[in-house]
C-alpha cells in the first residue's frame, strides 16, 4: 500500500490499533496469556508505525523532497530501535508469555497495510 498523505497514514495506524484490540479480544476466549501477549505484539507494531507516521508526515512539505528522504531514513532507523526495545521489554516483563501470539500478531499488524491493499 502506498501511503501518500497524513490522513491516509493516520487511518492506517488507527486500523492497526483496532485490529490489535479485535484479535486480542478473540484470543481472550482461548486463554488470557495469549490475549495479553497478542495485545503486546499488536501494540508494538501499531505504536512503531504511529511513531513513524508522525515523524514522517507530521510536518510534510512537498517543496523539500531531499528533507523528506532524510526524514524517512531517520524515522525507519528510530522505528527499528523502538521495536527492539519494546520487544525486549515485553519478553522481560510479560510472564507467562505466549511467544506465538506476541510475534504472530506483531507480524499480522505489521503486514496489515499490504493486506489492505490486496483487498482494494
Image (cartoon, grey):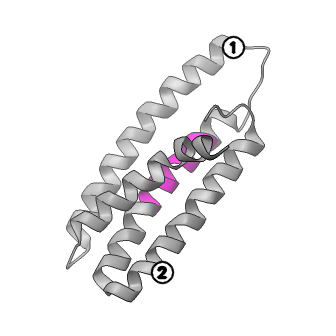
Residue pictured at 71% horizontal, 38% vertical: 58
Task: Give the CA separation, mark 2 to mark 1.
Answer: 42 Å
Residue extending farthest to the front is 119
In the picture provided, is 15 more to the left or to the right than 32? right
In the picture provided, is 59 more to the left or to the right than 113? right
Q: Which residues are magenta?
A: 43-53
In the image, is residue 105 above or below residue 82? Answer: below
In the picture provided, is 32 more to the left or to the right than 114? left
* Residue 86 falls within the magenta-colored stretch: no
Quarter of the image where the C terminus is located: top right
Q: In the image, which disc is placed on residue 25?
A: 2
In the image, is residue 62 above or below residue 104? Answer: above
Q: In the image, which disc is placed on residue 65?
A: 1
Please tell me which residue lies in front, 116 or 99. Answer: 116
Q: In the image, which disc is placed on residue 73?
A: none
Q: Secondary structure at mark 1?
A: helix
Amino acid at each position: 500500500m502506498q501511503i501518500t498523505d497524513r490522513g491516509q497514514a493516520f487511518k492506517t495506524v488507527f486500523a492497526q490499533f483496532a485490529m490489535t484490540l479485535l484479535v486480542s479480544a478473540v484470543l481472550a476466549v482461548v486463554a488470557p496469556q495469549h490475549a495479553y501477549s497478542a495485545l503486546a505484539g499488536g501494540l508494538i507494531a501499531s505504536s512503531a508505525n504511529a511513531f513513524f507516521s508522525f515523524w514522517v508526515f507530521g510536518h510534510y512539505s512537498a517543496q523539500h523532497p531531499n528533507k523528506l528522504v532524510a526524514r524517512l531514513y531517520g524515522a525507519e532507523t528510530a522505528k527499528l530501535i523502538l521495536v527492539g526495545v519494546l520487544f525486549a521489554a515485553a519478553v522481560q516483563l510479560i510472564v507467562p508469555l505466549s511467544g506465538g501470539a506476541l510475534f504472530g500478531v506483531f507480524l499480522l499488524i505489521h503486514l496489515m497495510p499490504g493486506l489492505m491493499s490486496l483487498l482494494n
